[in-house]
Image (cartoon, rainbow, N blue to C red):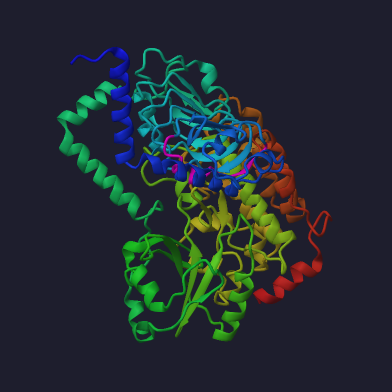
Amino acid sequence: MALNGRDLALVVCSFIWVVFQSCGVSYATVNDIYCLRTIKDSLEDPLNYLNSSWNFNNNTEGFICKFTGIECWHPDENRVLNIRLSGMGLKGQFPRGIENCTSLTGLDLSNNKLSGPIPSDISKRIPFITSLDLSSNSFYGEIPLGLANCSYLNILKLDNNRLTGTIPLQLGLLNRLKTFSVSNNLLTGQVPTFVNPNASITPDDYANNPGLCGAPLDACQGSPRKTHAGIIAGAAVGGVTLTAIVVGIVLYYSRGVVIKKDDDPEGNKWTKSILGMKGIKVSMFEKSVPKMRLSDLMKATSSFSKNNIIGSGRTGTMYKAVLPDGSFLMVKRLQDSQHSEKEFVSEMNTIGSVRHRNLVPLFGFCVAKRERLLVYKYMENGSLYDKLHPAEPEAKGMEWPLRLKIGIQAARGLAWLHHNCNPRIIHRNISSKCILLDENFEPQLSDFGLARLMNPLDTHLSTFVNGDFGDLGYVAPEYMRTLVATPKGDVYSFGTVLLELITGEKPTHVADAPESFKGSLVEWITHLSSNSILKTAIDKSLLGKGFDNELIQFLKVACNCVSPTPKERPTMFEVYQLLRAIGGRYHFTTDDEILVPSNTADDYPDEFIVAFETEIH
């Protein structure tokens, strides 16, 4: 018997309903209610948009469909289709519980005060999304490659945030994407080529980023990248080669971003002296870190294998530690110290109590015979030195906004040590090697407070004796004469770091200088200044991109910091404020983060300097 159109439609609908029921779709409504609960709980709602509307004391079908900003597939069924929460003043991070809205196709969180990174697994959390608008917030970090797996995307708006890095070229392969905007961020590199012929991407969609190139913008300098077609063809022909390259990259990054230092000539032979002490507990300051023993540190670092070295400096050698859950820590083997165990423990308790967003947190420590081991938070992007002076010459340079951000926030950390920390601390070992970068490239100072634990022979001089001249480029000239550490000595060292940031040169080897020049970076800058050609010192890759005025102001601050006369150098509070003013338009800091020194005199108080002179000697 033939079915008419109406009967056929009823049969089809009944069939679809049976399939949905058999697949468990009826349970989706429970998930969606839970989804909205987690979203509400994870966000601050100062304007009470959610608190006044999202009332979960209801069990009627479709009650969540009446919530502000919620659209359902059907008004009488608790299955969320779209979430539109634009302009509600919401604070917090990307709501990770959104993955429980399993039928979601549209998400608009624009014009709020959300921050943090966009989840790297975003395609698993909102797999069927067709429209995603995260614009006009404060999201930072890189654009996740996972967005390229959101194959249903039609609209993607990420403009007016603080996103850094490059735009994943794979986004161009989204064949449904029509609208794409990343303007007013801190992005660099080549922009994607979109395969959808209906995509209307204009230069305005990329505006106000520091270094984007490629159509519809200006062509990228250097060798052009392969087109998507070329990449696909190359992958088909050279699959084995491509696989080898990918494996190599994975192995490289699995060992840590920081370039390995061959700075342990005895290998891990020193560990033999503590093999019988594996049961010693690691004293921990951070409750979020699991309790550990020395045996756990040995296992996590492969018995402090040379392959686990991720950095070295005047205070000791740093190792990468891999915990059983896959997370990372850093473990420093402190350089030989003549201090007693009691004195060491006292110093560690002081340093362990120091907390600031631009200081690397000390999680704990361990004493095993003469060995002193410190446990730190892991810094994903290694040291500033390695980023400015990569071992591989073809490695991508750092763009100006990122360099400026690092300079401002590192200055904030050192200024806090000088002016607000109790007790106030002179670092004494400031260099680009001790400025570490977290996953968002926010700088954090390491090695603070450790100078007092070194041998009586000053660490600066010991590095000179051992032939490590590089670190001497940071040492203030008056220190070499008096061996007295002062805050103005830290300012000089930090000024050298600022010169590294703006010139791209190493502290003792100036590649851009004539071969006949054998002086330090500071001496080179002084020479150029006397000849009124200071601008030529600026890294050529930074010039002509709309930042020239900021570059010149930044260079002047650096020059003031390395003045040969300590009295003529600014305090670290003044350095921070000067740099902060230069970077005001980027909003790297906010008003509630302004550091207020306890002393506002032109110089540091004499009792502060005398106190540290006494400790040093």
Q: Quadrant of the C terminus?
A: bottom right
Residue 133 appears anywhere in the view: no
Tell me: residue 483, above or below residue 393: below
Q: In which quarter of the image is the N terminus?
A: top left
Residue 400 part of the magenta-drawn span: no
Residue 289 position within the rendered picture, expressed as x and y whole percent measured from the top left: 49, 67
Q: Residue furthest front?
A: 1
Residue 90 part of the magenta-drawn span: yes
Q: What range is drawn magenta here?
A: 89-103
Frontmost residue, 265 versus 482: 265
Residue 431 appears anywhere in the view: yes
Residue 317 quadrant: bottom left
Residue 342 position within the rendered picture, expressed as x and y whole percent measured from the top left: 58, 85
Q: Residue at the spot x=77%, y=54% of the render?
A: 567
Q: Residue at the spot x=54%, y=69% of the render?
A: 287
- Seen in the image, is 15 located left or right of residue 59? left
Frontmost residue, 106 versus 243: 106
Tell me: residue 45, above or below residue 382: above
Frontmost residue, 84 versus 218: 84
